[in-house]
Image: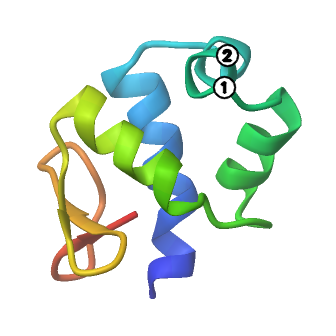
Amino acid sequence: MVADILPENIKKIRTEMAHMSQQAFADMLGKKLSIVQKYEGGSIFPPPDVLDKLSELYNIEWRQSHKRRHPALKSEKSMPV
C-alpha cells in the first residue's frame, strides 16, 4: 500500500540520497520541519509540488499519480512514494 511505503521512502530520499537532516531537507523543500516530520511519520501525504521537486532533484521517475521507481527505495511491485 502506498501510504505504508511513502513515509519510509521519503526518509530514504532524505538520508540515503540527499544526506540531509530533517531541517536541511525542510529548508530545501521550502517547508517547515514539522511538515517533513509528518511526511516521514505518515500523518500527511506530500503534495504534488513536493513530489515533483524530489523527482527533479533526485532523478526519480514518477509513474501515474505520485508513483515512481528508484532502486534505492523500498517497493511493493513498483516504487510508490
Crowding at label 2, few (<14), some or many (≥20) Cα neighbours within 10 Å?
few
Residue corresponding to mark 1: 30
Name the residue located 15 percent from the left edge and 36 percent from the top edge. Answer: 59
Name the residue located 43 percent from the left edge and 13 percent from the top edge. Answer: 19
Q: Quadrant of residue 29?
A: top right
Please, which residue is most extreme toward the bottom here? Answer: 1
Please, which residue is most extreme toward the front here? Answer: 49
Q: 49 above or below 3?
A: above
Q: Where is the C terminus found, in terms of image quarters?
A: bottom left
Q: Are marks 1 and 2 in contact (CB under 8 Å)?
A: yes
What amino acid is labelled 2 in the image?
Asp
- Which mark is drawn over residue 27? 2
Marks counted in the figure total 2
SS category of the residue bearing label 2: helix
- Residue 6 image offset from top left, x and y in percent: 50, 64
Q: 37 above or below 61?
A: above
Q: 51 above or below 4?
A: above
- Which mark is drawn over residue 17? none
What amino acid is labelled 1 in the image?
Gly
- Residue 13 image offset from top left, x and y in percent: 39, 36
SS category of the residue bearing label 1: loop
37 vs 2, left or right, is right
- Residue 53 image offset from top left, x and y in percent: 39, 38
42 vs 71, left or right, is right
Query: Colour scheme of this structure image?
Result: rainbow
Name the residue located 55 percent from the left edge and 76 percent from the top edge. Answer: 4
Crowding at label 1, few (<14), some or many (≥20) Cα neighbours within 10 Å?
few
- Residue 34 image offset from top left, x and y in percent: 87, 37
